[in-house]
Amino acid sequence: MKYIIAIIKPFKLEQVREALGALGIQGITVTEVKGHGRQRGHTEFYRGAEYAVSFVPKVKIEVAVESSLADRAIEAIQVAAQTGQIGDGKIFMLPLELAVRVRTGETGTAAL
Amino acid sequence: MKYIIAIIKPFKLEQVREALGALGIQGITVTEVKGHGRQRGHTEFYRGAEYAVSFVPKVKIEVAVESSLADRAIEAIQVAAQTGQIGDGKIFMLPLELAVRVRTGETGTAAL
Amino acid sequence: MKYIIAIIKPFKLEQVREALGALGIQGITVTEVKGHGRQRGHTEFYRGAEYAVSFVPKVKIEVAVESSLADRAIEAIQVAAQTGQIGDGKIFMLPLELAVRVRTGETGTAAL
Amino acid sequence: MGLGFTALLATALLPAQSAWAAASINKGDTAWMLVATALVVFMTVPGLALFYGGLVRSKNILSVLMQVFVTFSLLAILWTVYGYSLAFTNGNGFIGSLDKMFMNGVTTSSMAATFSKETYIPEYVYMAFQLTFAAITPALIVGAFAERMKFSAVLLFMTIWFTFSYLPMAHMVWWWAGPDCYTLAAETAKACVGDAAATDFLAKLAAAADDTAKATVLTDYGTAVSAANGWLFNKGALDFAGGSVVHINAGVAGLVCAIMLGKRVGLGKEAMAPHNLTTTAIGTGMLLLGWFGFNAGSNLEANGLTALVLVNSILGAAAATLAWSLGEWFTRGHASFLGAASGMVAGLVAITPACGWVGPMSAIVIGLLAGFVCLGAVVWLKAKIGYDDALDVFGVHGVGGILGALLTGIFVNPNWTGGWAGSGVTDYAAFDTSSKILEYSFSAQMISQIYGVVTAIVLSAVVSVIALLICKVTVGLRVEEQAEREGLDLSSHGERAYS
Amino acid sequence: MGLGFTALLATALLPAQSAWAAASINKGDTAWMLVATALVVFMTVPGLALFYGGLVRSKNILSVLMQVFVTFSLLAILWTVYGYSLAFTNGNGFIGSLDKMFMNGVTTSSMAATFSKETYIPEYVYMAFQLTFAAITPALIVGAFAERMKFSAVLLFMTIWFTFSYLPMAHMVWWWAGPDCYTLAAETAKACVGDAAATDFLAKLAAAADDTAKATVLTDYGTAVSAANGWLFNKGALDFAGGSVVHINAGVAGLVCAIMLGKRVGLGKEAMAPHNLTTTAIGTGMLLLGWFGFNAGSNLEANGLTALVLVNSILGAAAATLAWSLGEWFTRGHASFLGAASGMVAGLVAITPACGWVGPMSAIVIGLLAGFVCLGAVVWLKAKIGYDDALDVFGVHGVGGILGALLTGIFVNPNWTGGWAGSGVTDYAAFDTSSKILEYSFSAQMISQIYGVVTAIVLSAVVSVIALLICKVTVGLRVEEQAEREGLDLSSHGERAYS
Amino acid sequence: MGLGFTALLATALLPAQSAWAAASINKGDTAWMLVATALVVFMTVPGLALFYGGLVRSKNILSVLMQVFVTFSLLAILWTVYGYSLAFTNGNGFIGSLDKMFMNGVTTSSMAATFSKETYIPEYVYMAFQLTFAAITPALIVGAFAERMKFSAVLLFMTIWFTFSYLPMAHMVWWWAGPDCYTLAAETAKACVGDAAATDFLAKLAAAADDTAKATVLTDYGTAVSAANGWLFNKGALDFAGGSVVHINAGVAGLVCAIMLGKRVGLGKEAMAPHNLTTTAIGTGMLLLGWFGFNAGSNLEANGLTALVLVNSILGAAAATLAWSLGEWFTRGHASFLGAASGMVAGLVAITPACGWVGPMSAIVIGLLAGFVCLGAVVWLKAKIGYDDALDVFGVHGVGGILGALLTGIFVNPNWTGGWAGSGVTDYAAFDTSSKILEYSFSAQMISQIYGVVTAIVLSAVVSVIALLICKVTVGLRVEEQAEREGLDLSSHGERAYS
Ligand SMILES: Nc1ncnc2c1ncn2[C@@H]1O[C@H](COP(=O)(O)OP(=O)(O)O)[C@@H](O)[C@H]1O
Ligand SMILES: Nc1ncnc2c1ncn2[C@@H]1O[C@H](COP(=O)(O)OP(=O)(O)O)[C@@H](O)[C@H]1O
Ligand SMILES: Nc1ncnc2c1ncn2[C@@H]1O[C@H](COP(=O)(O)OP(=O)(O)O)[C@@H](O)[C@H]1O
């Protein structure tokens, strides 16, 4: 199994979720994060103070999938999250050794 | 070493922490996340607008443990987090290659 | 490639980012988390109610780097995040199998 | 005329009555009462709602806001339809009549008496001012059953409790004939005791040979006038702005609700820290502002006494803020903001019955005591008895109200001097428009105060129990456990406060 | 004198005028109007800003706050420089003159008429009270184009719309000669119709043989006085506190803006739930408080009628809160807090034109209808037509305002009794300082009301379209899509609300 | 009588005094002053607390709220115990006496003079109004040392600074004998200069042969009356509502605190963006509302001048909002909401000393200048000097206060016309109840103003330094670095604002 982590633009979340759903992947976990990369941040002014905010709001998606689905999942995310503009984000794939469904105790791909 | 990621119901956090503590596992890191899965979300109305909220609030726990402890840790989490109802969450285990304690620079299981 | 996860004290974020930048590592993703470990929490009082808060605010940094950079990155983080006081945090390194840049579809180290 | 009928003791708010020649309205009084009324509305909507809302968990804030807003709205309508009439018309000592139902007979030119002879205000502003009291009192109870009660049960409970606990209390404590009735004169007496009796009394007065005889006539006349007054008013229970009618009444209802509903799911196990103390701070400030209208408006005029009431309200609040903070500092090592804010409210509660009767130095002492005592109630009493009064309605309003009622009996003492001097109690009985201060008796006054306190406790407790039982068998009291966990905002109201 | 000129029908706010002997100022009125003015400022800054601000997404709240604060500031200045003069001096039936530009001729001792004969208030407090109306009305429109309009376009639009839609409406509806002008007497007539005409009318009156002849003279005199009144005022359109001038006017402008700006990026696809309903609750409470100043201040005096206006405002708000909640409960299974708050505002909108003309029971009915109708407008009408009126300016203020204007025509009926009795319309024409109630005609009154409604709709729509076109060709209407996505706080104002 | 003693120049607030026959209280004035007082309380609690609270980081908001709430409470008590007496009784030119300590001699029927002859208000409302000034002024300083000062040090500093800087300033600027004392008549003179002197002056007046002789007597009498006035009052320094007593005073103390406490840990390295600008918006709106009470209440009556003060306050705020926004727009490309809100406060600060002396057009100019100048102070001055005045107490209150004080000297000019006309300065000296306007001299007036400004700066700076040194050696000034990092909410108060 694989553990896919994707960092995307926040307003793309719904589209990505649908794209994964179309592959039959229902379970995902989402976190609000801040990202730094090629996409530059911005400058904020508060009275006399000026702050260069180097971080941009992003959304992190985590999906555990069976290995065979991983490539299609990654592609689906990549297509759905793309705007072509800088800051579109990244997708990372990590090896996943075990998955357990808390409710039932099922393990492996049955747990996903 | 193993890197355990668990997605659980928010109100189960304290119980899970205690269960891990009972195994001698003190160090954990917690993130508020939103999850999508079998547990359906809900519909919200704001005047004329209706939103199907597909995400449910969850809590993500990350624990790095020595491999020998991993099974017991996972079991402890699974037992403590279980309500038997849909949406109880998942536990994932990933391989962990290195751990460092920032304060001392210690590495490996000593750092956990 | 390696996936580095570091839990640090919030006010050290800027220093860590600069230290990584000095190594040429631009891309990082940051999450606000709560940690539990050796560093004890605190007690809060709200009128008659007393709560032992066992969690301490931390910041989680995620950086994907090519394997050759990993050691230097970890060291840079460790040095920059250190205060010498309890609660300085941890650095974890996980194997990373694939990285994709959403904007271009590039993969591998080119995507970082 | 040392007439001993404490029945005349001015309590606080008072009623409408038909006008007579010398009666006049001063636009300065009207302006003040319009403002005071507006401020008490603001105290509830959004003041109280925010004060409470900040203290619950973020998943329940909208339910609290909703309960307060809708309770206010519901009671404003009920007050207009029948509440005002039942509270503020002649009936018996316990409840009024339905004569003014649907605002029957109330017009833009009808007048309500104040505490000064020949001084009136427009009846509509009196009705509106009283409306705000009738609306905030039940809303106070919301804090006790917060985070778990069914919305339909809330509305049903409010309706029953308002009708059977609030209206009788208001009538018993505040309904009286007004000061001009106690002037035995041709123009006024007829309206107050009827034509025949008036002619009779006037003849007797004319026939009275000496001062003692005259005093006897006046006493008899006063008794006749007082016959239709509220029972507690006649008992001489002092309650300037609503210590018993509002705070003890609501506080006891809160205690009963907390006990009968049971504890919130997870209490003691999960953290239930206030989700937003800034919101509570906003609410506290609004309560403070509104309370000035509440207390100083209760004088019904804009004069030097109104100014003293304002001063006392500020001082009571300030002293209790300091006391609660000090109390926490000593017992826990920290003075918390929530403590300071709670102290401010406790001080305002305790000064409410006293504010028009005591000097400013006494107000400071009342505030200090309120801060320490309510802190004790909330920390130790609650823990000891073990009820889940979520937002401490009983600990602050109940306990603070009782404390204030008793201290009023002490500090009203007119024999003290300087900033400590109490006002004493006015004796309005005269055959000209004069009035004077009655002699002060500590034991008599304390007994009167205890009458007020005990009546409020018993009535409110009994009505609350019955109302909750009715809710239980009809719509049910609590939401499902699952709904409570999810939060009432989503489960009862289909929305979330924060996105 | 059954003089049939409905022109005399008192509408709501009214003008400054030079004083004469019997004219007097009561400090109680002044005190009340100072407060009322302060409260209406508070209603806008920060009340309205917060009400709206809580409803947008967190990335746009500062832009909403900014638009309201700066609109208020801009219009306060414009009002002082030329607005007051154009609205409240003699000109023609549609607009006034520039005589009082830069506050020329206004001093601390100049006076403004009220609705009662011989009763005046300081002109500066009248000017300030009206300033607050002129400032809040354009600010209401902000809700319609929220989250997407360029800041420079907002300011340009406001300036044009205020000048060409608000000022004429205020003049047409509210400008009149004042009650004393309708007393045909030596002291007053000269100031009202000029020396020659006054002498002439007085001679004719003296020569009039019988009552019919006298009535004819008075009618002619009244017509002469009314010549300079606002056009809609003379039509007899009743609008006590600004249903047409403020709410329909702003509501229609909002609709036009919503349509011409187009939908927000992502509407229907992304969730656009309110980011902080607690903020909206704070705003709602402040709107309620401010509205008391708005409505009850519109009586310009502190008397029994002012008190009734206050009561009606509370009841209209309360009834609509309940109605909207009930409506949601029945149609969706949940009563939401946002619904309750929206109902409260809708009730206040609908009671605005009616509040000084109707009885309290009628106010309840108006509120109930407003709750149901505006809920319908916001849920069904908006969905059907498909415009993106982001915060429902049209659904609440436009629809509520029209409903209120029409219901005013019904409930003003003075022939009903008890709590239902309307005030009828005052006829000020007399040769002493008396005045009386005109006979009520349903159809005539409704036609008058429709005149008011239609004029507001047409004028506001036309001016809005032109103003937006001007903005479009000069500074541009909308921000870039990228800027809209990022949020206006950052892209237009360089800051974020929450860190 | 062109009596040249500028000592008579009415400054702003004024004192209690024993009443005489023609003295009367108008309930309209009382109503207004009750409201004004309530509004200034609201301005501090919670207004100022929220304005500041939103600007700090979320880990420190409760500490700011706490400091403001407790400072207010502490000073309300101290004011009642000894402050009022030291500020507003006869003593010398620099401080009063302890005669009214513990509210000794103050009753519900004692009266305080206004600026109009024979016009009084209840002394308690005057005392309460002044209490609010005494409580908000120290609270303003909280913004300067926010996020790092020890709570115990805050309380100690406040007590010392209030006693030795605020009370003398209030006495020096505002204490005077009241207008009736300047009428040389039998009823008043005895109370003002003592029996013997009064008899003497009256005899001399009777003996005076011609107008010149009479004028000499009146001048001498005036000098005798003024002997006990405040030193700056006698210097003729104009300060209508507290530019020097409140704003310069607090602003300078803030600067000293900022410098002596040193910078916050992490300043310049970590982002210290305001954690919640919505909270600041709420606070801004409350400050605006409260300021109406503050400025317009300072007239002590409800009349046409009060209305002008209200208008000027609105315009000063509005103009400065626009100016600060424009300034940012030009210099940075964005107009920020925080800028608009800061401008609003700066405009209110600058209009404070001027609001009762200048015309509305002048108020606009003062506001515009305040917006630009304070923006400059906050952006450039602060950066240049390099102190960490966390929330810009000096940049806004200090600089705005000085600017306002100087501009008052210019715009008070009574020789201008229309909306620009200043009021000039009233000369109360007469042997009837008349009074007139003194001739205007630019240089003389500016020198008076500079006296006021410099005195406030020097006194406040010296007292602040000493008070801080005392705190340093007793309880210590700053919290530990670790505690500062963790946030004062947790480390000093044991709680968190948001869960
Ligand atoms: N090496 C990395 N490790 C972890 N997160 C990264 C890395 N590089 C980029 N990111 C995340 O991806 C986001 C987008 O990356 P960025 O370089 O701005 O644009 P792009 O994806 O178009 O190259 C960043 O904001 C950051 O959250
Ligand atoms: N494949 C997955 N990858 C990542 N997170 C998942 C996955 N499946 C489920 N989750 C997380 O677990 C939560 C619970 O899953 P759900 O399917 O609703 O119920 P259950 O665990 O009872 O089957 C989800 O809300 C989501 O956060
Ligand atoms: N085994 C672990 N797994 C995951 N996170 C951990 C683990 N141990 C510690 N942490 C994280 O690191 C933080 C610091 O650890 P702590 O034990 O308090 O101090 P130190 O790093 O100085 O030993 C914790 O708050 C927690 O967030």
Image (tube, coloured by chain):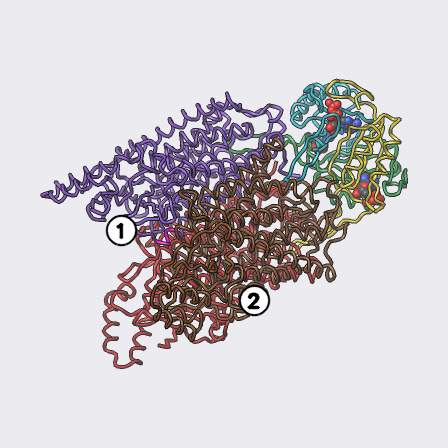
Chain colours: A yellow, B cyan, C green, D purple, E brown, F red
At label 2, which amino acid type do we have?
Answer: Val
Numbered disc 1: what chain? D
Mark 1 crowdedness (10 Å alpha carbons): few <14, some 14-19, many ≥20? few
Instruction: Check residue A6 for magenta coloring.
Output: no
The answer to whether residue D405 is seen in the rendering is: no
Q: Say what secondary structure mark 2 lies in.
A: helix
The answer to whether residue B111 is seen in the rendering is: yes
E481 or E14: nearer the viewer? E14
**What mark, if any, has residue E81 been given in the picture?**
2
Q: Position of residue E215 (x, y in %)?
A: 39, 63
At label 1, which amino acid type do we have?
Answer: Ala
Quarter of the figure that contains the C terminus of chain C: top right
Q: Position of residue E48 (x, y in %)?
A: 58, 49
Label 2 CB less than 8 angstroms from ligand 1: no
Q: Position of residue A52 (x, y in %)?
A: 73, 51
Give the magenta part as a residue range: D26-30
Quarter of the figure that contains the N terminus of chain C: top right
Q: Position of residue D272 (x, y in %)?
A: 58, 30
Name the residue rendered at 62%, 24% in the picture: D482
Mark 2 vs mark 1: same chain? no
Q: Is residue E303 above or below residue E123?
A: above
- F465 left or right of F114 in image: right
F451 or E497: nearer the viewer? E497
- A40 left or right of F80 in image: right
Q: Which residue is mark 1?
A: D21
F184 or B66: nearer the viewer? F184
